[in-house]
Image (cartoon, helix red, strand yellow):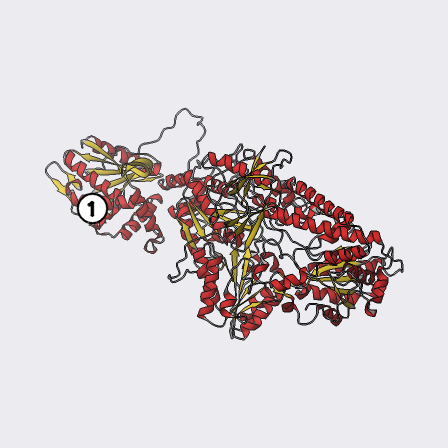
Amino acid sequence: MAQFTFPLPDVGEGLTEAEIVHWHVKPGDHIAVNQIVCEIETAKSLVELPSPFVGVVHELLAQEGDTVQVGSPIISVTGEGDEPEPDTGATQAVADSAGSVSQEEQAPVKNLVGYGAGATDVVSRRRRTQPAPSPQAAVEGSMVAPGAAEGGSVLAKPPVRKLAKDLGVDISAVTPTGSSGEVLREDVIRGAGQATVFKNLETPAWPENREERIPVKGVRKAIAQAMVKSMFSAPHVSVFVDVDATRTMEFVKRLKASPDFVGIKVSPLLVMVKAMIWAVQRNPTVNSTWTDEEIIVHHYVNLGVAAATPRGLIVPNVKDAQNLSLRELAAALEQLTNTAREGKTTPDAMSNGTITITNLGSFGVDTGTPILNPGEVSIVALGTIKPKPWIVEGEVRSRMVTTVAASFDHRVVDGDVASRFVADVASVMEEPALLLD
Amino acid sequence: MPYTDATLRLLGQDGVLVKDERVEKYHQAIAHLDEADFREFYRVMNVVRRFDIEAGNLQRQGHMALWVPSIGQEAAQVGSGFASRPQDHIFPAYREHSVAYIKGLDLVDIIRMLRGVTNGGWDPKKTNNFHLYTLVLATQTLHATGYAMGIGYDGACSTGNLEKDEAVMVYFGDGATSEGDTNEALIFAQSYQTPQVFFLQNNHWAISVPVRVQSRTPLFERAAGFGVPSVQIDGNDVLMSYAATRLALDAARSGQGPHFIEALTYRIGAHTTSDDPTKYRDEDELKFWQAHDPIDRFKSFLEARGVESSFFAEVTQEAEDYAADVRVRTLAIEDPPLEDIFQHVYTEDHPVVAEELAWLKNYTESFEAGAK
Amino acid sequence: MAKAINEGLRAAMVGNNKVMMMGEDIAQLGGVFRVTEGLQEQFGPNRVVDTPLAESGIVGTAIGLAMRGYRPVCEIQFDGFIYPALDQIISQLAKLTARHAGTQAFPVVIRIPYGGHIGAIEHHQESPEAYFAHTPGLRVVSPATPHDAYWMIQEAIACDDPVIYLEPKSRYWYKGQVDDTSAGVETYRARVARVGTDVTLVGHGAMVSMLHQAAEVAQGEGVSAEVIDLRSLSPIDYATIEASVSKTKHLVVAQEAPGNASVGSEIAATMTEKAFYVMEAPVLRVSSFNAPFPPARLESQYLPDVDRILDAVDRSLAY
């Protein structure tokens, strides 16, 4: 003898609930199929509900006056032995929902015909046996595997392309590290740290002669003499500090977008140069010259920039850099670099420097121990600026980190001054707003 | 008083044949009917009414989104349905369950449609040309007219052979007469003199809108305005329904062009199970029409002719059995397969359809079976 | 929501006696969804009018009434029955303001219950919004909550342009708070229904509640979804979507309508143009299949569901 429950149907196309107005039967009553068991009131009308079952009323599962949700059982009937009711869709739905109620968080009763607009209670994903298929009518594999990018076309998402444009990076020269061969944001940023002074050199074949003899003369001879003079007269000490330069990178980005800097090359080097000038103001002795009799502290900054040229390293300087606005400084540095690249730097430009910066980062190098430019007592090295894990507010975050390095002549600059100077430069890299001082 | 002087009937409510020279030719039209035919009319009206009630109950038990009752309109439909000849094409609206039955449709197919298993559910070629139900009002009138035009172009009418000449009958209601389509259908029909009968079941209500909002004049007069010969009949008189339809169809198939019948009847039930007529109908009006019930009227007629009471009991039992069988079969209806979404969108291959079906299959299979 | 629209209509009728309703079964019966219940009682048969059964007739005569100075609110009983009226809507109502060179306004509102998820028969579950959104000269709106429904119907009636007001019928009986003291909602500003950071989900009408469900599930999986209720399909408030996408970088649009040439397609194309450099993935659409609405037993597979939406979210985030 089976028991059947009658769930409240949706009698009017999308109804969600109804009120039991009146029961026509009570527990113990024998009822026939289609016998009216109750009257309900819906948003649309009063409706009489006929029994789907023949049998004895077992229990009224809702009271008169109750508002019942569509799909909830309202009456249970014990079926009579000689007239078994086949499993109706109605019963099945209740059996399913009864089973699911016992396990929390189950999906709602499937939306059957005559069971309303579908529940909105607990919803969860259906469990999967296979991964979801790719989208309808999708173009399969929009990210093509490397090697399929023929004709040198670069794979990169639009935001990455824009970043490359903004940072002045030639995206086709960037090494992609994405899993489908695409250029990632980090790749572009890394590319931005490298100046394109030279074209990428190819790896040449081994020459046939066993030796090549290059005469020491000209620029090479001058460089060698300067290095020796510097290295073996001044006791060099090098100091290093790692700093979170994210704000400098953001500042540079904003400058690039600024109308005032249209057409002017802006880079982290510019910020570091400004930082150095500020740090010199706070630590004047780093900007001086040693003679055996006296230390000449310069109250002006002729800022040298180590420039790699096809003929070798030269250090032209920007005269009176302390008087230049940011914009003027940027323009001066750009001109200095261009002139050097063209091999047109004048001797005057290369003399009377007071402090130097060298950019190791353009070669992707983290840091180094630079050698002083003769006549100077400090040289700062800018290393590559790249994403590294950093602790921010107690959490590990990816930040743009760089090492600020500097070498000093220990006859003039003691450890404390050296450290303070380097710390000042680094603190500006960390917070360019300090330049507003 | 819904009946007018123009309303023609053969049978009074008391079941007694009417003597009136206006209906002389209609008496002639039923002269060939015999006892067996009359019993068949009675049987069909009862079986379909009982089916109708059962279907309404099944809806209330959650087995259909809605049910469309035809209770009260059995005589209009049974009479006209039997009057059609086997070669005729019938274009129904969505309430002609008696005509469907007569033409051989399995009435559970109607339930399938309202249950959401099909959007139509049968092939007219297999139901003696009883076409699909049309849920948008009045569109079938134009389809019927076009079909009738085709019969004309094929030369399949007007040969003088009543057993062979084809005709079309289209059913629609009083509400549908307001749609532009109905009026355009009449215009085309009379322009092309189609072999067609427009059978209007004026059941006096379009959901909650009474027929007087649709028309200030009797609807059969409108057809006359289009140049289509028309007649108004007491639609609850199954004999009159038969007679008028027989004459109209045979005239239409014989080259006399379209004809129009307005059958006055009443929608005893609601528009559908979503409707509540107590909100807009008069108790008295309902009582009037219940007193003019078509089945009661015909029973009186048969009793007066000496039909034995056991016959009536047998019919009642047959109707019960029929309803019980419909219940069993309805409960056993299975859900349609996924493919049905795409199966017949086009006749010819179509790339979008193939792709989406393949995707949906993959997608469905990616879940645990039975996962909700 | 049905009650909220009813109250909104009432407020509009009280506020301006040129506002009138016309449609099938709206008077005594109060509408097949009871949205106009009690209105004829209150405002009389000249302001709440049961029409003959003719959709083209309803809209066409509404146009004439608007010319006479009335503000007609038409009800078309179901989405699938709008089509006989398309000529009056597209050839006439949408173009009349321009044709008259602005010398007359045509403040006609056409209310249409639309959408599926109620197990209905053919023609009673469609989503025809694209036909209207594609037609210049019309405004097309759809509320997702009772509060919005209450205010948006009043704003539609007050608007001097023709408005197609699409009522999500599967939401008619769902309840929500209505604040009738507020200043209204801005119909033409999309509503951020749920704040999130990882992906933007955009939808309208009944879809909004499904997007909420999807966002809940996503939350449990560690994905924070922002849900935007468009409110208006023509014009679309792209500024709100842009602001969201600039934060989340990922956009999924969901709709009950079939996807081909749909409102969702328009959003995808426009947002791609506006936010090309911001988005980390293409705009993904979740729509019904490009087939006629199937018999109701198949509707839950045909229409988008939470799983399909979440799959799209997964795909978007995986780009």
Q: Is residue A183 above or below residue C160?
A: above
The image quarter containing residue A197 is: top left
Question: As drawn, which residue projects farthest toward the right?
Answer: B160
Residue farthest to the top, as pictured: A210
Can residue B58 be seen? yes
Q: Which chain letter goes with mark 1?
A: A
Looking at this view, is B243 or A257 the one in front?
B243
Where's residue C93, x and y in %?
Answer: 56, 67
**Dot 1 crowding, Cα within 10 Å, few <14, some 14–19, many 20+:** many
Q: Position of residue A304 (x, y in %)?
A: 25, 43
In the rendered view, would you say C2 is above or below A49?
A: below
Across and down, in percent, residue B183 comes to 70, 66
Where is residue B55 drawn, in percent x and y? Answer: 65, 48
Judging by the rendered image, the residue that carries numbered circle 1 is A278
The one nearer the camera, C192 or B185, is B185
Residue sitting at x 48%, y 64%: C9
* The one of B325 and C289 positioned closer to us in this rendering: B325
Tell whether A362 sits left or right of B110: left
Where residue A316 sits, quadrant-wise, is top left
Residue drawn at the location 82% of the way across and 69% of the way down: B22
Q: Is residue C257 left or right of residue B75?
A: left
In this rendering, position of residue A148 left or right of residue C184: right
Residue B313 in the image: above or below residue C129: above
